[in-house]
Image (cartoon, rainbow, N blue to C red):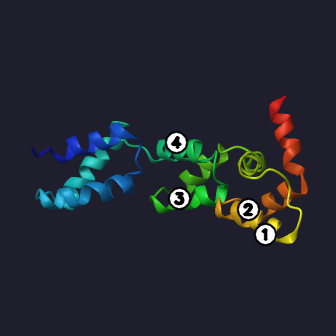
Amino acid sequence: MSETLRQRALRLLAQREHARAELKRKLARHAEADGHSEEQLEALLDDLVARRLLSDARYAEMRVSVRGRRYGNARLSHELRQTGVAAETAAEAMTNAGDELARAQVVWARKFDSPPNDAAERARQVRFMMNRGFSSDTIRRLLRGEGSAAAELEEE
């Protein structure tokens, strides 16, 4: 059962939002195998954008809202760039990510029981938070205890 390129694109978009470059990459090998040209694929993507079925801005907002609970701004920005989202679209989505310090507090509290009591534990916690994409300034403020005040304000 062979499905057309448009049907394949709509099926992928029904599963979740995609960035234009990501969808193009997924469809390219099928387009080539079915004898479609690069221009035909671009025309399909342009049509999907015109019909508002494909939107990089919507993809970026979705990606930031879903993954923003677990990751810092640096990692989120990197992931958006990797999927081909334009820098200005990514920056606009990042403004809606919320306070990075408050998000870091939640991630840190979920992983660790208490503040570090020695240099080795501090280094371990810093590495964990950096791997999650939080900035060094945010991590420094968090480990100084500034994050707990932000979390208390959110609870009220």
The Cα atoms of the two marked residues, 3 and 2, are separated by: 15 Å
Q: Name which residue type carries label 3.
A: Glu
Q: For residue 41, which quarter of the picture? A: bottom left
> Of the residues tagged 1 and 3, which is closer to the observer?
1
Q: Which mark is residue 62?
A: 4
> Of the residues tagged 2 and 1, which is closer to the observer?
1
Residue 94 location (% of width, % of height): 63, 49
Label 1: which residue?
A: 123
Q: Is residue 149 above or below residue 34?
A: above
* 63 and 95: which is toward the camera: 63
Q: Name which residue type carries label 1.
A: Ala
Q: Secondary structure at mark 4?
A: helix
* 88 and 77: which is toward the camera: 77
155 on left or right of 98: right
The Cα atoms of the two marked residues, 4 and 1, are separated by: 32 Å
Q: Secondary structure at mark 2?
A: loop
* Tag 4 near tag 1, CB within 8 Å: no
Label 3: which residue?
A: 79
Mark closest to the chain's N terminus, 1 or 3: 3
The Cα atoms of the two marked residues, 2 and 1, are separated by: 15 Å
Name the quadrant of the C terminus.
top right
Name the quadrant of the N terminus.
top left
Mark closest to the chain's N terminus, 3 or 2: 3
Q: Which mark is residue 135?
A: 2
* 60 and 134: which is toward the camera: 134
Mark closest to the chain's N terminus, 2 or 1: 1
Question: Exactly how many numbered labels are in the figure?
Answer: 4
The Cα atoms of the two marked residues, 3 and 4, are separated by: 12 Å
* Tag 1 near tag 3, CB within 8 Å: no
Residue 119 location (% of width, % of height): 86, 71
